[in-house]
Structure formats: C-alpha cells, structure tokens
Image (cartoon, rainbow, N blue to C red):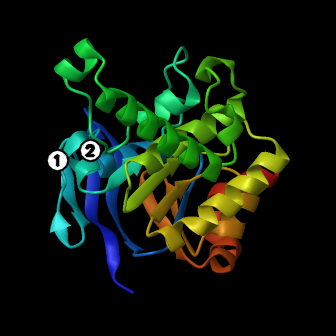
Amino acid sequence: MSALLELRGVARRFGGVAALSDVSFAVPVGAVVGLIGPNGSGKTTLMNVISGVDAPTEGAVLLDGTPVQGLPAHVLARRGIARTFQHIRLIPDLTAAQNVALALHAPSAGAVDILLRLPRLGRIETARHDRSTTLLAKVGIGHHARTPAGDLSYGDRRRVEIARALAAVPRLLLLDEPAAGMTHGERTSLRDLIAGLPALGVTVLLVEHDMDLVMGVCDEIRVLNQGQIIASGAPEAVRADPRVIEAYLGAEDA
C-alpha cells in the first residue's frame, strides 16, 4: 500500500530543547493510524509540523511523495490536510452549522448579492446550511445544526470540530484527542465514524489517550516517547511491546 504521508528524520527543537528527534514513519493511503505516547512526548508538536503550524528544524514531510515541510497551514489545507485541535476552536455565538460552513469549499456571496439581497444569496446560504447539516448528521448531531456552539456539550462541540474538518474534503485528517470529554456512548459513535472515513477517501492520523478506541479502530500504531518513535506496527503487536508497556501502557495501568 502506498504512503499518503511520510516523515523522514523529522526533528523540531525549541531553543536547546528537542521536542522531536529523527521521527520517521509512513501513513498508508486509506488507513487509520494511531499516534500514542505519554503526555509531553511530542504528539501535538508532530501534528503541528505535519499540518504546517510549525516547520521542522530538520527532516522532510512528504504528501504523496512531494516534500511539503515548511509550507503554511492554509496551503497544506488546500492540498488536502485537515485537522482538529486538542483544545476546541469554535466560535461559540455561531450555530453548529455556521461553524462548519466556515470550512466549506463553496461559492461565496458577492457584495452586490449581499447589498441587494439577490436571490442568489439565499440559494448560497441554503446550500451551505444544507451541506453543513449533512456533515453534522454524519457525526451524529444533525439535530443541533441551529444550536449555538457555546450551548453544546463538550462532546458535541468535539463533533462539530470533526464535521468542520470534514467540510474541507481532506485526503488526510489529523485528529488530536477527539474523544476527550465524550461519554462512553459518544466514544462508541466516534469509533464507528472514524472507522468509516477511509471508505469516504479519508486517511486518518489519530492522536488519542483512549486505548480502547485506539486499539479498536486503528490499522497501525506509532508510539512516540520523548520525541522519538519507539515502536510501530499492528495494535496487538504494539500492545505487547515491552518498550511500550514500560513507557506508556504500564504507566497507564499503574
């Protein structure tokens, strides 16, 4: 299986501190790949490097075999990389549908449409709302389309973020702790949603602390510890790796 994303010797230093060091791995097309590790291991820093929030100090990030390291986030978004963030970034006074619509690749109303309230404006607004509501329904909260984001539960706000990321029609979706704050039932629905994304043409890199979710949905797992990859492989192989147990899973069980 070919790689959609490939990291080659990626390092990221902040002053004299190495947050990432010689990180190399691939994310195959159509796979759900988990990225796990203890708090402070560099997972979010790596997501920032991949998505263009930060540039690597060393190494290469390849998308479809083309180097993209150092390109800004908006350029990478146009090339098919979307992400959610560990800390929710919604506009609380806008409805769930309006938050999703911000990321839609759809025609925008012009100044003349707005000033004269031409029929085209209504059609554009209706189409954007319908598309946003459809995406919200895909993540299980279509009934909250007209609810202000600030009035939603924490778990539902997470779902709005995922719907907004999907609105960009990504080829690669970076999910940064999407299950945080969700109930058991919400996490079950989230697992089903993530598992179905490859069928929609979306490859997933998932950062998550919920090991039941990671083990249940991921085709492969990469383990990061102190800024370096210490294990990589199928979920059961990673779960049984002594280095992973010592660095992460053992500590979780303690």
Q: Earlier in the sequence, mark 2 or mark 1?
A: 2
Q: Quadrant of residue 215?
A: bottom right
Residue identifier under label 2? 52
Q: Are marks 2 and 1 in contact (CB under 8 Å)?
A: yes
> In this view of the protein, which residue sits in the foreground, 183 or 223?
183
Local secondary structure at mark 1: loop
Q: Is residue 41 above or below residue 30?
A: above
Q: Is residue 181 above or below residue 200?
A: above
Classify residue 117 as left or right of residue 221.
left
Give the x, y percent position of residue 246.
Answer: 67, 61
- From this viewpoint, is residue 33 visible? yes
Amino acid, disc 2? Gly
> In this view of the protein, which residue sits in the foreground, 89 or 225?
89
Q: Is residue 28 above or below residue 150?
A: below
Label drawn at residue 70: 1
| Disc 1: CA contacts within 10 A as few (<14), some (14-19) or many (>=20) | some
User: Who's the residue at 54% across and 45% down the image?
Assistant: 162
Classify residue 43 as left or right of residue 183.
left
User: Who's the residue at 60% across and 61% down the image?
Assistant: 194
Give the x, y percent position of residue 18.
Answer: 33, 44
Picture quarter with the N terminus: bottom left
Q: CA distance from mark 2 to mark 1?
A: 6 Å
Q: Quadrant of residue 119?
A: top left
Label drawn at residue 202: none
Give the x, y percent position of residue 211.
Answer: 72, 58
User: Who's the residue at 66% across and 50% down the image?
Assistant: 209
Give the x, y percent position of residue 68.
Answer: 18, 57
| Disc 2: CA contacts within 10 A as few (<14), some (14-19) or many (>=20) | many
Query: Outermost residue, bottom direction?
Result: 1
Classify residue 95 as left or right of residue 82.
right
Classify residue 104 as left or right of residue 63.
right
Amino acid, disc 1? Gly
